[in-house]
Image (cartoon, grey):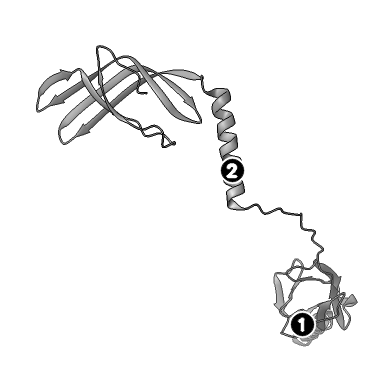
């Protein structure tokens, strides 16, 4: 008797679950042109399952009557509908996008504007300068060199001028140390009008230009 009662309860539960599930079949189309939307995505909200429509926008999905289906397609606004409210077709509306007007300038026009701006910046900031302290230590093939000095740099858009107030260049190699009063400095700024290699005296460091 207990076995029969358990069998009846199991039968009712299975029957209720089967009744609650429904096979939902429909087509996803463009809401304006009524053309099918191939391979649109359809999934059950909160259930972690879904499907993809075929090339004609048709799909088939099993879900409960109170489940909510969400339809998405690239370039269209998403749509959510209860399973009980899904008809023969599901219409998605395209997303309207407004493009801003863009003016395309020739390359030479852009270069001319850059040149004019550089010229303006150069004229208004050509006398600006800053003071720096430089210290550099490097080791190459067993020879360690130290260069340090106080300098003033004049710059407007690019490096134009360097004035060394004082400094020293120290070299140590193979356990022996010696000093030199000559430093070879290379400056390669952005503009082609400058960029020279000069030998500077530690006694009187002259301006590069």
The N terminus, quarter of image = bottom right
Nearer to me, 109 or 67: 109
**Cα–Cα span, label 1 and label 2:** 54 Å
Of callouts 1 and 2, the N-terminal one: 1
- Rendering coords of residue 199 (x, y %): 25, 24
The C terminus, quarter of image = top left
Query: Based on the displayed image, in which of its 4 quarters is residue 125 positioned?
Result: top right
Q: What element carries label 1?
A: loop
Q: For this view, does 139 lie left or right of residue 186?
A: left
- Rendering coords of residue 46 (x, y %): 75, 66
- Rendering coords of residue 116 (x, y %): 59, 36
Residue indicated by mark 1: 57
Query: Based on the displayed image, in which of its 4 quarters is residue 164 positioned?
Result: top left
Query: Based on the displayed image, in which of its 4 quarters is residue 30 positioned?
Result: bottom right
Nearer to me, 14 or 43: 43
Nearer to me, 169 or 34: 169
Residue indicated by mark 2: 112
Give neighbour class at mark 1: few <14, some 14-19, many 20+ (Cα, 10 Å): many
Q: Which residue is drawn at 76% across and 54% down?
A: 101
Q: Can residue 147 be seen in this view?
A: yes
Callout count: 2
- Rendering coords of residue 203 (x, y %): 24, 11
């Amino acid at each position: 008797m207990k076995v029969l009662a358990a069998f009846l309860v199991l039968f009712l539960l299975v029957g209720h679950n089967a009744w609650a599930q429904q096979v939902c079949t429909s087509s996803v189309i463009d809401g304006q042109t009524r053309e099918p939307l191939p391979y649109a995505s359809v999934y059950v909200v909160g259930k972690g399952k879904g499907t993809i429509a075929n090339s004609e926008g048709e799909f088939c999905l099993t879900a409960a009557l109170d489940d909510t289906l969400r339809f998405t397609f690239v370039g269209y606004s998403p749509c959510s509908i209860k399973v009980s409210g899904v008809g023969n077709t599901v219409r998605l509306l395209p997303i309207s996008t407004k493009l801003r007007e863009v003016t395309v300038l020739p390359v030479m026009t852009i270069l001319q504007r850059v040149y004019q701006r550089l010229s303006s910046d150069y004229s208004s900031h050509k006398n600006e300068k800053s003071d720096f302290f430089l210290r550099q230590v490097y080791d190459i093939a067993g020879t360690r060199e130290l260069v340090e000095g106080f300098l003033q740099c004049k710059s407007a858009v690019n490096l134009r001028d360097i004035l060394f107030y004082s400094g020293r260049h120290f070299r140590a190699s193979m356990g022996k140390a010696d000093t030199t009063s000559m430093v070879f400095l290379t400056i390669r700024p952005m503009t082609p009008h400058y960029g020279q290699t000069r030998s500077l005296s530690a006694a009187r460091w002259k301006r590069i230009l």
